[in-house]
Image (cartoon, helix red, strand yellow):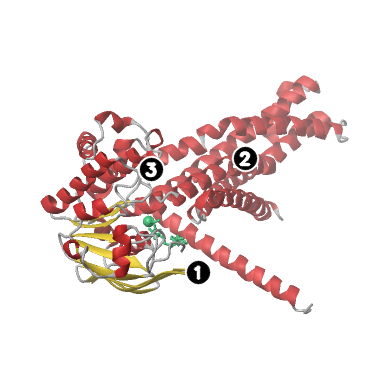
Amino acid sequence: MNPLVPLERLGRAVLLALAAIGRITRFALGAASHILRPPFYPREFGHALMNVGWLSLPVVGLTAIFTGGALALQIYAGGARFNAEAVVPQIVAIGMVRELGPVLVGLMIAARVTSSIAAEIATMKVTEQIDALVTLSTHPMKYLVAPRVFAALIVVPLLVGIGDIIGIAGGYGVGVQNLGFNAAAYLKNTVDFLEPLDVISSLVKGAVFGVIAALMGCYYGMNSGRGAQGVGRATKGSVEAAAVMILAANFVLTGVFFSV
Amino acid sequence: MIAMRGVHKAFGANRVLQGVDLEVGKGTSMVIIGGSGTGKSVALKCILGLIRPDAGRILVDGKDAGSGDRDAFLARFGMLFQGGALFDSLPVWQNVSFRLLRGSLKRPLEEARAVAVDKLRRVGLKAEVADLFPAELSGGMQKRVGLARAIAAEPEIIFFDEPTSGLDPIMSGVINDLIREIVVEMGATAMTITHDMRSVRAIADNVALLHGGIIKWTGPVAEMDDSGDPYLDQFIHGRADGPIEAVR
Ligand SMILES: Nc1ncnc2c1ncn2[C@@H]1O[C@H](COP(=O)(O)OP(=O)(O)OP(=O)(O)O)[C@@H](O)[C@H]1O
Ligand SMILES: [Mg+2]
């Protein structure tokens, strides 16, 4: 085998990745410009708010409460029995608000919302509904993409906030019920320990992850291949891309907010 | 009014259009016939700018189709897609009056609904259908809703991609008459794709046969039967043997 072959493959992969980043960036800029310019489609926006926000609440709540509870047990079991009554609430609060709340909510949104957006838009593409939109003088970016991305930008931070609170409540439940902590002290420890920056970072992450999730669903949907297979590939690709990009963005944002 | 000049389009190695030349006069009805997979739908989509041709020019009223205000350009067109392409998240009547519910042609809700019901009646659908969703309709009913949507805003130029496929003979007759009426009464310019020779005779002023990526024959419908063109003859009579291969 030619020794340069692996190098060539690597080069090609890098080029492909760069091209993809370029296309996604252009798509994102296009979406942003359509969010800002009329005409607006309030009904589509309302639907998107409902689907991304309200209907995601159960899954977000369940994820958060179990995670907060498990975290409390884990910290207690992991050697923090000494001084546990102060340490457990503090670590649960920090862990939920800074990292687990936004990341888990982001991943849940990627599973629930990204996939449904991608499948819906890809099906519309495959059945010529996108073409039909265009011939009816309606811009698909404006009608389909902008409302979904904007809704996610607004509503996912709220979901993250709710997830943080429910996660802390999960830790509180385990602490008070199972570990016999004092309820008032638990709350005081939580509130005293959290800084405004923790909360701000949590919400900013939520906004970024929401945009990533909706944008990836739309991007893969709009670029879907033909037939049922095309829809399947678009859906799979969108969730993979959204999940990986959310985790990468989380790393970067944590660095920005908390590295000294 | 519509002119295609040397239009080429390939999908990878599949060279679909290889220099299509076609003129459609204002207020006339052009019917495009041709074997399955020869690129008839692609040709219509090229005119609308849904597919970008690789080469050639498309002129509408003497101006390049791609130039100028795209919204104003598209506002002149109505299109029935081969598969209907109804929006399955919207009830039938909102599909039909989609254009009238938003954008520059927006009208009050009641009025838009009345227009939808009227257009549905013209394609032979009862008012009850208006509140159903597309998924609740049969294939032929979906096709007719697509047709109603194409004509709802009374466009100047209307494209029909197989308007009568999947319909019973009576309903096909109704639709043929409707298309003819739209051209004659509203003065619209129509391009229709069909495989149904009865429709061709009912709808067409002019006929064009697309084969091998080019327009093999075009002329008035009256000259279709004694054109002397072997391709056209084979197509009209539906013979398996002839210059057009059965396996393509
Ligand atoms: N978006 C696309 N991507 C790739 N190939 C395409 C695309 N659209 C059409 N084709 C190919 O172009 C060719 C012509 O397709 P087209 O839909 O225009 O056929 P048609 O003449 O309308 O046939 P039919 O009468 O069966 O509808 C086919 O070989 C099809 O596979
Ligand atoms: Mg076709």
Quadrant in the rendering for residue B148: top left
> Circle 1 sits in a helix, a strand or a loop, which is it?
loop
Q: Find residue B140 and report its horizontal and vertical position in percent.
A: 34, 40
The residue under label 3 is which amino acid type? Phe
Alpha carbons under labels 3 and 2: distance apart: 28 Å
Circle 1 crowding by C-alpha within 10 Å: few under 14, some 14–19, many from 20: few
> Circle 2 sits in a helix, a strand or a loop, which is it?
helix
Q: How many marks?
A: 3
Q: Nearer the viewer, mark 1 or mark 2?
A: 1
Residue B134 versus residue A47: which sits nearer the camera? B134
Q: Residue at x 15, y 59 (%)?
A: B27
Q: Are marks 3 and 2 in contact (CB under 8 Å)?
A: no
The chain containing the residue under callout 2 comes to A
- Figure quadrant, ligand 2: bottom left
The chain containing the residue under callout 3 comes to B
Q: Residue at x 35, y 54 (%)?
A: A134
Q: Is residue B34 visible?
A: yes
The label on residue B12 is 1
- A37 vs A99, left or right, is left
The residue under label 2 is which amino acid type? Met
Circle 3 crowding by C-alpha within 10 Å: few under 14, some 14–19, many from 20: many
User: Does the beta carbon of the residue at mark 1 sit less than 8 Å from ligand 1?
Assistant: yes
The chain containing the residue under callout 1 comes to B
User: Does the beta carbon of the residue at mark 3 sit less than 8 Å from ligand 1?
Assistant: no
Q: Which image quarter holds the N terminus of chain A? A: bottom right
Q: Nearer the viewer, mark 3 or mark 2?
A: 3
Circle 2 crowding by C-alpha within 10 Å: few under 14, some 14–19, many from 20: some
The residue under label 1 is which amino acid type? Gly
